[in-house]
Image: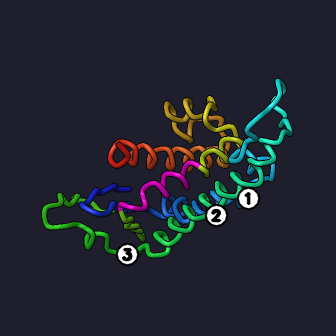
């Protein structure tokens, strides 16, 4: 993957098949596809809880559920819709050399296979960040990825030498991929 910052847009390109799949799957995951109702609730925590963390029903919490929660849900849905449109406009190529500009340094060896490119209007950055964040929060709730010792183990030894299952390794890779994109957005665009 390559991140390119331009005047009025940013570009994720040289996405291999796995990276493209992670991007393609992003809006669906952020909407809760494949997650239990319990996991989806993590995006909408109650505003008041008791000592055990259970929701407390008050006039304020009822107002929150009636007036605030629908706005949050609508905002998330709008963010995902913007990201979906950007993804739908993605380009695929078997010849990624065409994406290099005149001043770019072209590597001597190009990756094999198809590559994808997503061009994102600068005004869509917050929607991308929100959608990535929604996804990561639910992935962590469902699979406990943020503090998983396997993340550290995999960073040292890689998936081939670890006792981590292939399914867990794929989830960790996807989670880390989303972390990287969020980091890039924060460091380069959201200051």
The residue beneath circle 3 is: 93
Direction left: furthest residue: 103
Binning the other alpha carbons within 10 Å of mark 1 as few (below 14), some (14 to 19) or many (20 upward) gives few
Cβ atoms under marks 1 and 2 closer than 8 Å: yes
Q: Position of residue 120 (x, y in %)?
A: 39, 65
Alpha carbon of mark 2 to alpha carbon of mark 3: how far? 24 Å
Describe the element under mark 2 as helix, strand or loop: helix
| Mark with earlier residue (2, 3) | 2
Binning the other alpha carbons within 10 Å of mark 3 as few (below 14), some (14 to 19) or many (20 upward) gives some
The residue beneath circle 1 is: 34
Q: Where is residue 16 in the image (x, y as percent from the top left)?
A: 44, 62
Describe the element under mark 1 as helix, strand or loop: loop
Front residue of this view, candidates 113 and 119 = 119
The residue beneath circle 2 is: 28
Residue 39 falls left or right of residue 136:
right
Direction front: furthest residue: 59
Residue at image location 62% in from the left, 48% down from the top: 171
Is 184 rendered above or below residue 24?
above
Alpha carbon of mark 1 to alpha carbon of mark 3: how far? 30 Å
Direction top: furthest residue: 51
Alpha carbon of mark 1 to alpha carbon of mark 2: how far? 9 Å
The magenta region covers 122-133
Residue at image location 86% in from the left, 39% down from the top: 57
Residue at image location 42% in from the left, 56% down from the top: 125
Is 93 rendered above or below residue 153?
below
Q: Position of residue 10 (x, y in %)?
A: 33, 60
| Mark with earlier residue (1, 2) | 2
Cβ atoms under marks 2 and 3 closer than 8 Å: no
Q: In which quarter of the image is residue 183?
A: top left
Front residue of this view, candidates 55 and 126 = 55
Q: Please identify, in this view, whether the residue under mark 1 or under mark 3 is nearer the observer.
A: 1
């Amino acid at each position: 993957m390559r991140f390119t910052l331009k005047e009025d847009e940013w570009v994720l390109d040289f996405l291999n098949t796995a990276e493209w799949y992670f991007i393609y799957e992003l809006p669906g995951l952020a909407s809760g596809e494949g997650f239990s109702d319990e996991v989806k609730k993590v995006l909408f925590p109650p505003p008041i809880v008791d000592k055990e963390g259970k929701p407390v029903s008050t006039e304020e919490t009822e107002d929150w559920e009636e007036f605030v929660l629908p706005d949050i849900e609508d905002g998330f849905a709008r963010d995902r819709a913007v990201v979906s449109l950007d993804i739908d406009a993605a380009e695929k190529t078997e010849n990624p050399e065409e994406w290099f500009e005149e001043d770019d340094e072209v590597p001597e060896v190009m990756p094999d296979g198809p590559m994808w490119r997503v061009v994102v209007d600068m005004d869509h950055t917050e929607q991308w960040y929100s959608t990535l964040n929604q996804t990561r929060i639910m992935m962590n709730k469902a699979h406990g990825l943020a503090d998983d010792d396997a993340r550290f183990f995999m960073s040292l030894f890689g998936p081939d030498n670890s006792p981590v299952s292939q399914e867990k390794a794929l989830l960790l890779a996807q989670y880390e991929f989303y972390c990287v994109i969020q980091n890039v957005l924060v460091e380069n665009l959201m200051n």
